[in-house]
Image (spheres, grey):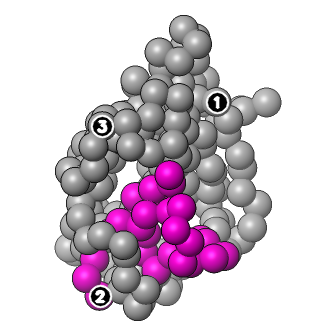
Amino acid sequence: MILDATAGNRSMWQHKNTESIIYIDIEKRLAVKPTIFCDNTNTPFLDNTFDTIFYDPPHYYRTDDSDLLTMTRAEIKLDMKFKHRLHTYYGSRFARYKHQIIRNTYLAQKEFMRILAPDGLLWIKWCETKLTLKRILSIFAEWQILMIINVADPTHTMGKYQTYWVCLCKKNIGGEQTRFEGPNFH
């Protein structure tokens, strides 16, 4: 069984209605409703339920409500372009600031540790709009990095930012431990 823990409008899926995927989201205003409305930091699922979890948390945050005064024209343009999609983006209304994104990511990965099967995989999508991949992966201390894929498609990089897909498993699988070294992934 697969869990999309940040379903949005299921925009990353080519087949949006498959029985092998459970879609969850907390946003009620979605055009394509999730299977279950719930918070990915506290799900109704039993331990070890899923073989694979996909997680695409909010990457972009505002520094404060007066941020427009210090932003460049390009940043304002990007912010306005992104704002119209916020209702499709998991938790964007609930994780508007850096500390909220970090806290929600921490709590979500703890929940994923509980509901992911012992040999399951966690896939994270991260775009470095504000926080680096290295910073986000430091939250996943109990996980082992199996693979990092650079995304080159500009529609997934918000133009100038690097986006990654990262595949993780629970550290205790195989007894190996991996240390994240930084952006040189070769």
**Circle 2 residues within 10 Å: few <14, some 14–19, many ≥20:** few
State which region is magenta.
1-29
Expressed as whole percent of the image width and height from the top left, the position of residue 7 reads: 43, 69
As drawn, 186 above or below 167: above
Expressed as whole percent of the image width and height from the top left, the position of residue 3 reads: 45, 56
Q: Are marks 3 and 2 in contact (CB under 8 Å)?
A: no
Q: Are marks 1 and 3 in contact (CB under 8 Å)?
A: no
Position of 185 with respect to 5 (left or right) is right
Look at the numbered disc 1 and give the secondary structure of its residue.
strand
- Choose between 43 and 163: the one closer to the eye: 43
Earlier sequence position, callout 1 versus callout 3? 3
Reading the image, the residue beneath label 1 is: 146
**Circle 1 residues within 10 Å: few <14, some 14–19, many ≥20:** few
Task: State the CA–CA distance, disc 1 to disc 2.
Answer: 35 Å
Task: State the CA–CA distance, disc 1 to disc 3.
Answer: 22 Å
Q: Quadrant of the C terminus?
A: top right
As drawn, 36 above or below 175: below
Question: Label 2 sits on what residue type?
Answer: Arg
Question: Label 3 sits on what residue type?
Answer: Asp
- Choose between 40 and 182: the one closer to the eye: 40
Q: Residue at x 75, y 67 (%)?
A: 153
Please tell me whether the stretch drawn in magenta is mainly helix, strand or loop: loop
Q: Residue at x 22, y 54 (%)?
A: 44
Question: Label 1 sits on what residue type?
Answer: Leu
Look at the numbered disc 3 and give the secondary structure of its residue.
loop
Position of 155 with respect to 77 (left or right) is right
Reading the image, the residue beneath label 3 is: 47
Find residue 29 and name its label.
2
Expressed as whole percent of the image width and height from the top left, the position of residue 24 reads: 35, 66
Earlier sequence position, callout 3 versus callout 2? 2
